Amino acid sequence: MKIAVVYSSITGNTESLAKTIKGVISKDELVYFGSPQENIEADLYFIGSWTDKGCCSEEMKSFVSTLKNKKIAYFQTAGFGESEVYFKRLFDNVMKLFDSSNEIVGSYFCQGKMPQSVKDRYLMMLEKNPEDERIIASLENFEKAKTHPDQEDLNRLSSWVLTILKNV
């Protein structure tokens, strides 16, 4: 089987997941590892992105719109975590981008650390609204996210990859 790992990462979170996936896949099967580009041919695509405005990156949006009749395992990192409801909403948003001829064989989501600029923005917002519970919760989440993806996230990811490979 020919396998491609295609990902978009700006802070390194999604790249960390992609490298973990690469480490699980047989070197003989891996035909592509890197950012989206044209004409990647594989039997199975592991496609991953960071979260941008409740969806995937613009680069990934363009890439996935070109795929037809492919088997796809999708993975994504998000600054907010610990919410399967949120991850499901993200997945639903991304799935709208894929042509219906594709077969989505699984998905994996986990929290990822955010850039300091996000915390700075929250702090500015808190100065204007010191009692705003949503901003306070966002700052608390920022601190939780600093350690993600952690080893537990990567172990769960490795298990997910093995399950995908076994079932495809």
Image (cartoon, rainbow, N blue to C red):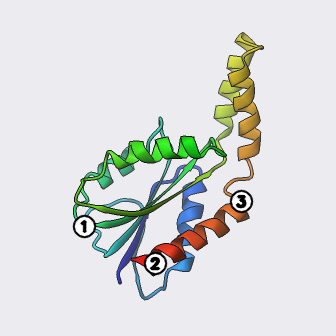
Give the residue number, with chain letter if any, for mark 1: 39
> Residue 47's image quarter?
bottom left
- How far is mark 1 from mark 3, CA to CA? 33 Å
**Disc 3 on helix, strand or loop?**
loop
Q: The C terminus appears in which quarter of the rendering?
A: bottom left
Q: State the count of labels.
A: 3
Give me the residue at 22% from left, 61% from top. Answer: 68
The amino acid beneath tag 2 is Leu
The amino acid beneath tag 1 is Asn
Residue 136 percent across, percent down from the top left: 75, 25
- Asked whether 32 or 67 is in front, the reply is 67
- Asked whether 140 or 9 is in front, the reply is 140
The numbered mark at residue 165 is 2
Give the residue number, with chain letter if any, for mark 3: 150
> Residue 66's image quarter?
bottom left
Give me the residue at 56% from left, 42% from top. Answer: 85
Residue 12 percent across, percent down from the top left: 59, 55
The amino acid beneath tag 3 is Asp
Q: Earlier in the sequence, mark 2 or mark 3?
A: 3
From the viewer's perspective, tell me whether residue 15 is left or right of residue 6: right
- Asked whether 25 or 133 is in front, the reply is 133
From the viewer's perspective, tell me whether residue 123 is left or right of residue 114: right
Inspect this view and state whether residue 155 appears: yes
From the viewer's perspective, tell me whether residue 141 is left or right of residue 8: right
From the viewer's perspective, tell me whether residue 7 is left or right of residue 111: left
Q: The N terminus appears in which quarter of the rendering?
A: bottom left
- How far is mark 2 from mark 3, CA to CA? 23 Å
Residue 62 percent across, percent down from the top left: 30, 49
Position of 80 relative to 41 (above/below): above
Residue 81 percent across, percent down from the top left: 64, 45
